[in-house]
Amino acid sequence: MTTPIKIELKCPCCNTKFESRSLMSTTVGFKETDFHPISLGFQALPLYIHTCTHCGFTGLLGDFEKPKKISNQLAKRISNEIGPLVRDGLPDGGTRYEFAARIAEWQGKDPETIANLYLHAAWCCVDERDMENESIYRLSAIEYFKRALDEEGCLSDDSRTTVTYLIGELYRRVGEIELAHEWFNRVISESDSDEAKQKIVALAKQQKDNPKNML
């Protein structure tokens, strides 16, 4: 069961104090094969992301509680590019995760972090039945996951296997089946006795040969 609570946050960009909603508890009933968690009750994903409606700064709870220093130049960019999009009220969860991804890129955060924000945006779109933006966000997640694979030291060995699988699954979900199989084959070709990796290898084989949407 998803139980929301009200919290007060201070924006690290403009210092405005504002009220947001967060989670007191949630129960995940199922997961999809792209690791999208399905909560019991209403979906919890939008409660993990917070937006200052004064300037537009958007991020996860840690971005407010333990913020990085925001330069005047970045603060101005956030206010100019995102601020006008939130002053009439909060947009949907997918859009707010997109804002967080854009800000994370402007802050120079690593590509895996940015990819995961776009992936969360896509998951929100699934819950919101926004198929057009779901595909856009999945493709953005693919782009940044690829960058994470290319960037030395960005991913652990275990994470590389999972990210490679995810790229294949995301391609499958946007209808790019040949590309999906290419990335699944990269996972399948791995020979490793590690149990966690072998689970991902087995999942890649399943999604190539007999794909399912739920784990």
Image: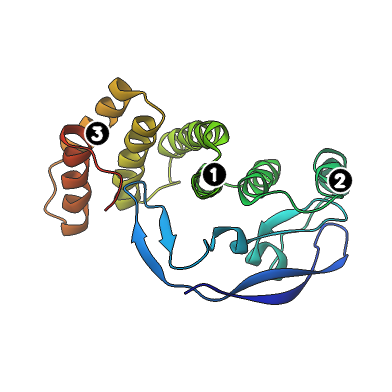
The Cα atoms of the two marked residues, 1 and 2, are separated by: 25 Å
> Residue at 45% of width from left, 38% of height from top?
145
Q: Nearer the viewer, residue 105 or 58?
A: 58
Residue position marked by numbered label 3 in the rendering: 184
Q: Amino acid at mark 3?
A: Phe
Q: Residue 79 shows which numbered tag?
A: 2
> Residue at 48% of width from left, 68% of height from top?
41
Left or right for 125, reference 208: right
Few, some or many C-alpha atoms within 10 Å of disc 3 (few <14, some 14-19, many ≥20)?
many
Q: Image quarter for residue 142?
A: top left
Q: Position of residue 75 (x, y in %)?
A: 84, 48
- Of the numbered discs 1 and 2, the one sitting upstream in the chain is 2
Q: Nearer the viewer, mark 3 or mark 1?
A: 1
Q: Position of residue 53 (x, y in %)?
A: 83, 56
Q: Residue 125 shows which numbered tag?
A: 1
* SS of the residue under disc 1: helix
Q: Amino acid at mark 2?
A: Ser
Q: Position of residue 50 (x, y in %)?
A: 70, 60
Left or right for 49, reference 125: right
Q: Amino acid at mark 1?
A: Cys
Q: Image quarter for residue 14?
A: bottom right
* SS of the residue under disc 2: helix
* SS of the residue under disc 3: helix
Residue at far top of view: 178
